[in-house]
Amino acid sequence: MSTPESRHLIRRYGLVVAIVGGVAASWLLQALPRSAQPLELTPVVAGVLDDPGSPRAGPGEADVTVVIFTDYRCGICQATDPALERLLAKDPRVRVIFKDWPIRGTDSTTAAHAALASDRQGRYRAFHTALMASRGSLDPPRIDRIAAEAGLDVARLRADQTTYAVEIDAQLRRHALQAFGLGLEGTPAYLVGPYLIQGGLDDGQLAAAVRRARRKAR
């Protein structure tokens, strides 16, 4: 026989389950990649691809370019970044263009600013990978420790952040404008060849997206 106390506990338990389930469903919806949207080579897309200030990895003569918009405080970005690294290691015909798009607060902006400064000493990719693998806050002291562990010259990193502050801020603004121009709703988001994909991509999904882009280019 139920009592008022037991009915209250059931309702309370049901509310907790609903909240937890809602959070889990929201994370899952963000994590699952959406359908690939084919894009024409508009001025917006050309600007995304041709921006010389965006860090790059891979060969200059690649047959597929992958553009990735990321935030170092984005859990899904952190979870899927290793797949991008494995793609670069396995596929010598892929080039990756990194678009730091800090949309999750002060720590995001601080980390993105430092990441672009690291490109001045040719260490962007190592630093990017280390930032993505880190957990917890990304305040300046923590960023300095991550930079040192990734093999960067921390004193130069700090100096470059000051010396190139105007250029780095302008670069981050360009990335934001490019994201808005593409209609992005958040991070991560990919442009794989001519296809826009919003949401995280694991190894298999990323490889499939590259194959589709190659077929389209033939």
Image: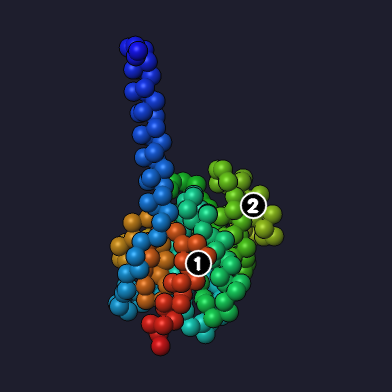
Q: Quadrant of residue 9?
A: top left
Provide the residue designation for mark 1.
204
Residue at 53 percent across and 54 percent down: it is 78
Residue at mark 2 to residue at mark 1: CA–CA distance = 29 Å
Q: Position of residue 150 (x, y in %)?
A: 67, 58
- Residue type at the position of mark 1: Gly
- Is residue 178 in view? no
Q: Position of residue 59 (x, y in %)?
A: 56, 80
Task: Give whichever of 3, 104 is nearer the camera.
Answer: 3
Residue at 49 percent across and 56 percent down: it is 77
Q: Position of residue 55 (x, y in %)?
A: 52, 69
Residue at 34 percent across and 65 percent down: it is 35
| Above or below, 152 relative to 13 | below
Give the structural element (helix, strand or loop) at label 2: helix
Q: Quadrant of the C terminus?
A: bottom left
Q: Quadrant of residue 46?
A: bottom left
- Is residue 4 in view? yes
Residue at 62 percent across and 45 percent down: it is 141
Q: Position of residue 74 (x, y in %)?
A: 47, 51
**Could you tell whether 149 is left or right of 161 in the image?**
right
Provide the residue designation for mark 2.
146
Q: Quadrant of the N terminus?
A: top left
